[in-house]
Image (spheres, helix red, strand yellow):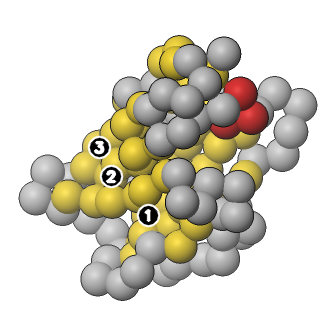
Amino acid sequence: HVQLVESGGGSVQPGGSLRLSCVYSVSVYCMAWFRQAPGKEREGVAVIPTGSAAYYGDSVKGRFTISRDNAKNTLYLQMNSLNPEDTAMYYCAADRVCRPIWDESWQDWGQGTQVTVS
């Protein structure tokens, strides 16, 4: 299993930016960011395969960018133009295979980092 530790969450005003990080213990083929707002189901945000193009959930396209630095064993999520609807706990996930953005059956998960936009 892959150990995942997120960081970088916090409070930001609408229109602001944050960059989340997720340090992983070993590199795997596919990684992703999910989020879960209070009272809502968990939502896929972005997925990045190794060596292939990333794909995003419709609600974040054009505002969020997922990237990874395997030399640093770190996954990133750059979030721009944040709005209150982006308030959620953000989780990184990892697996040997990539899954559709709506599929939550990833093998390994981090503990999450809170993002609040208000």
Q: Is residue 10 above or below residue 107?
A: above
Foreground label between 2 and 3: 2
Give amino acid for label 2: Leu
Q: Which of 27 and 102 is in front in this view?
A: 102
Tag 3: Cα neighbours inside 10 Å, few (<14), some, or many (≥20)? many
The residue tagged 2 is 75
Q: Is mark 1 on a helix, strand or loop?
A: strand
Which of disc 1 and disc 2 is earlier in sequence?
1
Indicate which disc residue 52 carries. none
The residue tagged 3 is 23
Indicate which disc residue 31 carries. 1
Q: What element carries label 2?
A: strand
Residue ID at (26%, 64%): 27
Q: Is residue 73 above or below residue 28?
A: above
Q: CB atoms at circles 2 and 1 under 8 Å apart?
A: yes
Q: In which quarter of the image is the N terminus?
A: bottom left
Residue ID at (29%, 83%): 51
Q: Which of 60 and 36 is in front in this view?
A: 60
